[in-house]
Image (cartoon, rainbow, N blue to C red):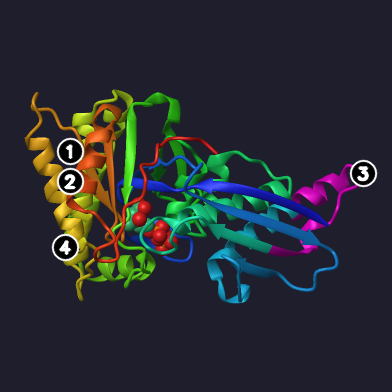
Amino acid sequence: MKTVTCTAPVNIAVIKYWGKRDTSLILPTNDSLSVTLSQDILHSKTTISASETFTSDRLWLNGKEEDITKNKRMHNCFRETRALRAAFEEEERRHGREVAPLSTWKVHVCSENNFPTAAGLASSASGLAALVFTLAKLFDLSTNMSYLSRIARQGSGSACRSLFGGFVAWEMGSEADGSDSLAVQVAPESHWPDLQALICVVSDAKKGTSSTEGMQNTVKTSPLLQHRIKEVVPARMKQMKQAILDRDFETFANLTMQDSNQFHAVCLDTLPPIFYLNDTSRAIIKLVHEYNNASPDGKLRAAYTFDAGPNAVIYAPKEHMKEIIQLVAHYFPGAADGSYFADPYRILQSN
Ligand code: DP6
């Protein structure tokens, strides 16, 4: 028996992925870019055991056994990594070296998140990234992250970005087989230590419309998405990369807020419309703009972004974070309506 445990971090996109051009290979309709959050507090942890005595693949998610045969995306990750392992074993044998036939052994997978699943906190990203990285370690495969990102992508699109720390782009690629649709690191976590993220957990309830289902309805019905894909995102990706390289918070903040707003606009442009933000989310948007408008030197001090749920992530330079936390705690004391706010999470750690 062989057992391996790994963790993977959450990433929060500042240029959002929303829409697939190929739903089985998970190939996106646009490039995206994210920031990886520190994994000391938020992470998915996966343990995989492989044994010649196991009779079937089994899966436990957050302590509850799930039917692994129904999980097509995990199956994709198993299929890809087992094929690579089988090729490796064949090569070893060809050279007369002994190797355990791990590619034929069944596996038991235990995966857990230490934060709410499916509440728009990118749990699938860290979960599938942890799965693929653990499989790679188990099977002694290459741990080149861009290489593995092509497999993680087939588990959940945003998972490919969680294989890197720091600032990460998912290049959509153009090949039909997905070979050039992969994640690359734009800058490491050490590049911008002054940038911090605050996660405001508005609700930890499971979201109504999953990203997977929602984004394909958007692809089918939203004319605004076509404009976003062709006209908006390509230019924004270039500007965002440059802003990160220059540690230019002003540009980073403007683009982050605009892109979050356009993502929620395409959700609204979908038929039937998808609503991820709630009144508390909108009040946070207003608060951040008011806080920026009140800036003594006229410079932006904070930026919000929202994924497929009502929870806000606020990016800000370290010097303003304390004040932002106080403001958020003052205006949104939590608990009252069942919502609460998490402690600040410092961002940017690699795996
Ligand atoms: C709004 O990666 O969860 O968080 O590829 O179908 O698994 P699938 O979708 P998923 O979508 C994430 C959407 C998003 C934006 C982003 O992370 O870029």
State which quadrant residue 171 falls in: top left
Q: Which residues are magenta?
A: 86-108
Residue type at the position of mark 3: Gly
Closest to the camera, between mark 1 and mark 3, is 1
Which residue is under mark 2?
Answer: 258
Q: Residue at x 23, y 54 (%)?
A: 333
Distance CA(mark 2)–CA(mark 1): 6 Å
Evaluate if marks 1 and 4 touch, with contact meaning CB atoms under 8 Å apart.
Answer: no
State which quadrant residue 217 falls in: bottom left
Which residue is under mark 4?
Answer: 279
Is residue 235 at least partly visible in the picture?
no
Residue type at the position of mark 4: Asp
Q: Residues within 10 Å of mark 2 (few under 14, many from 20)?
A: some
Compared to residue 266, the image places residue 196 above or below, namely above
- In terms of depth relative to the viewer, which is nearer, 238 or 202? 202
Evaluate if marks 2 and 1 touch, with contact meaning CB atoms under 8 Å apart.
Answer: yes
Distance CA(mark 1)–CA(mark 3): 59 Å
Q: Position of residue 13 (x, y in %)?
A: 34, 47
As drawn, the label of residue 96 is: 3
Horizontally, is 233 left or right of 154 in the view? left
Distance CA(mark 1)–CA(mark 4): 22 Å
Horizontally, is 275 left or right of 62 in the view? left
